Image: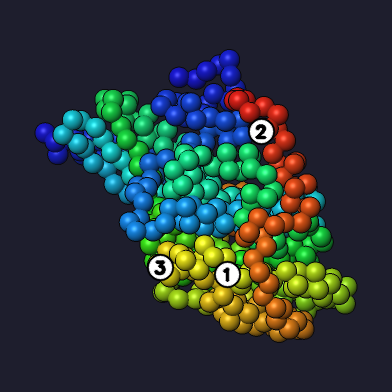
Amino acid sequence: MVTDGLDRARRAAETVTDPELPMLTLADLGILREVATEEDGTVTVAITPTYSGCPALVEMRADVRRALHNAGYPRVQVRTVLAPPWSTDWITEEGRRKLTEHGISPPGPAPARVSGPVPLDLAPSRRAVRCPRCAASDTEELSRFGATSCRALWRCRVCREPFEHVKEI
Amino acid sequence: MTNTDNPYGGLAEDDAHAGDQWAFGTGFTAALAGVDTALPVGIDQDDLALYCQMLGDDALVAAQRLIQWSTAAPELEEEMALANIALDLLGQARLLLARAGQVDGSGRDEDAFAYLRDAREFRNVCLAETPNGDFAHAVVRLLVLSAWRLALFTRLADTADPVLAAVAAKGSKELAYHREYAVRWTLRLGDGTPESRDRMTAALDQVWPLTGELFATHPVEARLADQGAAVDPAGVRAEVGEVVARVLVAATLEVPPAVPVPEPTGRAGLHGPELAAMLHEMQSVARAHPEATW
């Protein structure tokens, strides 16, 4: 019973979509860290912010609570976990497919982080970003920052369309 | 349920946290809502709270200066970049100030720290507060501040307070990106036209004298560093100096000689008059309508 309930609660939490990338669920984004049920029926959900200043986190907490209420769980606790920090490597294959389908280029591998100073890179950025519309690899960065914390602006030199790219972190 | 009488109703969290809403953080719950906030054992709480406040104030004040670029940056892309960087810093500030209020036992929330303190209660380094100049000034200040904060945060990732450690680990990724942005612009402007080079040189002349304070050790930092609960800023001087020097050399700019490290000023609550002026503007609505919600 408890397992059944847990599966159902997890499914309900997994369907919640991101307020700023509504084609993705929190599970696709790797933001949903844990779903657990307590003896007394309380569902505990752990989520993690993408960026420290992500204003969508409040919405997400409310949406998770609402989704579980609608699935028949009146007692819901949404925990925020800060560690380990979110990485774009946690975006699932399904999430990457949906991003591309919606004209947003998914992130490449996040920079490897070892302990110690972050290496200084003075060379021009050489990220290989493929155009999500025509799949050409002849693309260029227009702006390192975009409409939300997680995105940068790029342009395809082949089909000439601008597009958004999810920044690797 | 959609509240049709109030267009902002949909922005707000729908239940238990309704009482937390301030006009100035509409829909925001406390920054640390739902985070495990157990206090570290054996660490002086007043010291730790003040340390969180120092790092939080650096971010809050720097963010406010960056936000002042909105509608004034040379290009829309750079305006978005500066605003995004400010948003990251503001996120770090919210977490750190909320943590300060928990650790000192006062229960003050992030808004109380941001809006209800006077300039002399702010603990940010003075470099963060000096008024904006031209875009070159913004780039040079961002280069120095992000390189310095990144060096502190990478070392704080295993500090004694788990909340501070988590904020630092997360913030390091953001700061690395900020530094990269500042590096690109330093290279482009320093090794650019005679005009851009002159501007960068003038910006360095303005920013550089204030860099000594970044490496001054406040007694709180010294005590906590001994307990593995803080980073002594004197210990990051070599690394930050080398990073900045490498960027300046690559940008064909002259590396100014290191400036002497003064006694802590901003960290001790001693600020220039510009901070009070900036806070006056930043806090005016919150102070005029202390109970306002929307």
- Specify which label sits upstream in the sequence, 1 or 3: 1
Residue at 24 percent of width and 32 percent of height: A42
Q: Is residue A155 left or right of residue B27?
A: right
Label 3: which residue? B228
Mark 3 closeness class: few <14, some 14–19, many ≥20 residues within 10 Å: some
What residue sits right under mark 1 in the picture? B217
* Amino acid type of the residue tagged 3 in the rendering: Gly
Q: Earlier in the sequence, mark 3 or mark 2?
A: 3
Q: Nearer the viewer, mark 3 or mark 2?
A: 3
Kindly identify which chain the residue marked by label 2 belongs to.
B
Identified by mark 1, the residue type is Thr
Q: Which of these two is toward me, B5 or B87? A: B87
Say which residue appears at 35% left-offset and 38% top-offset: A78
Q: Position of residue B2 (x, y in %)?
A: 50, 20
As drawn, the label of residue A144 is: none
Q: Is residue A145 visible?
A: no
Q: Quadrant of the N terminus of chain B?
A: top left
Q: Which residue is mark 2?
A: B286
Instruction: Judge if badges 3 and 2 mark residues of a common chain.
Output: yes
Q: Is residue A127 above or below residue B86?
A: below
Q: Is residue B42 visible?
A: yes
Q: CA distance from mark 1 to mark 2?
A: 33 Å
